[in-house]
Amino acid sequence: MKRTYLTTFIIVFAVLATGALSLGAGAMLVAKPTSIAIVDVVKVRNALEEAREVTAEIERSLQEFQNQDKARMQGIEELRQDLELLEPNTPAYAEKRQDLLFKMVEARTWQEVKKAELNSEHAIQLERLYMKIVGAARDVGQLNG
C-alpha cells in the first residue's frame, strides 16, 4: 500500500512539475501585443497630387502614341491608294507595293515597342508611388506604435 501511495505521489508530482514548467515556458513564448492598422492604398493613391500628375502624364503619353499611330496609318492608307492607281506588273507598282509592306511591318513593330515602353513606364511609376505610400504608412505606424 505504501508503495502504491509512493507511486501515485511520484506520478502526481511529475504531472504537476511538468504543468508548472510548461506554464513558465508558455509565458516566455507569449509575444508582445501588436497593433494593427489598415491602409486603403487605392484611396491614398487617389488622394495624392503626385498620383494625379502621374496619371495625367500617362494619358499624355498615350495620346501622343495614338496621334503618332494615326499618322502612320494615314501614311499607309495613302500608299494603298497610290498602289491602286498603278498598273499591276509594272516596276512602279512593285516598288510601291514593297514600300507599303515595309511601312506596314514598321508600323506594327513600332506599335509593339511603344506599347511595351508605355506599359513599363506605367509600372515603374505605379511602383514608385506604391513604395512611397508603404514608406509613409510604415513611418506613421512607427510614430504611433
Image (cartoon, rainbow, N blue to C red):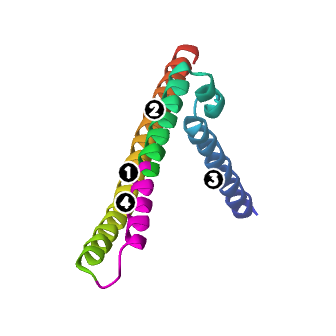
Is-magenta flag for residue 81?
yes
* Lower position in the chain sequence, tag 1 or tag 3: 3
Seen from the viewer's position, the closer of residues 34 and 10 is 34
Q: Nearer the viewer, mark 2 or mark 1?
A: 1
Label 3 amino acid?
Answer: Ala
Q: Are discs 2 and 1 less than 8 Å apart at CB?
A: no
Q: Residues within 10 Å of mark 2 (few under 14, many from 20)?
A: few
Q: Amino acid at mark 1?
A: Lys
* Residue located 50% across and 24% down the image: 53
Question: Disc 3 designates what residue?
Answer: 14
Q: In the picture shown, does residue 58 fall above or below 18?
A: above
Instruction: State left or right for residue 36 relative to residue 125.
Output: right
Residue 143 x, y percent position in the rendering: 53, 14
Instruction: Please say if the residues under marks 2 and 3 sit with CB atoms less than 8 Å apart.
Output: no
Q: Residues within 10 Å of mark 3 (few under 14, many from 20)?
A: few
Q: Secondary structure at mark 3?
A: helix
Which SS class for mark 2? helix
Sequence-wise, which precedes: disc 2 or disc 3?
3
Which residue range is magenta in the image? 71-89
Q: Are marks 2 and 4 in contact (CB under 8 Å)?
A: no
Furthest residue to the top? 143
Would you say the magenta stretch is mainly helix, strand or loop?
Answer: helix
Dot in front, 4 or 1: 4
Q: Earlier in the sequence, mark 4 or mark 3?
A: 3
Checking the image for residue 114, the label placed there is 1
Left or right: residue 1 versus residue 51 is right
Residue under numbered circle 2: 131
Mark 4 — residue? 107
The first of marks 2 and 4 along the sequence is 4
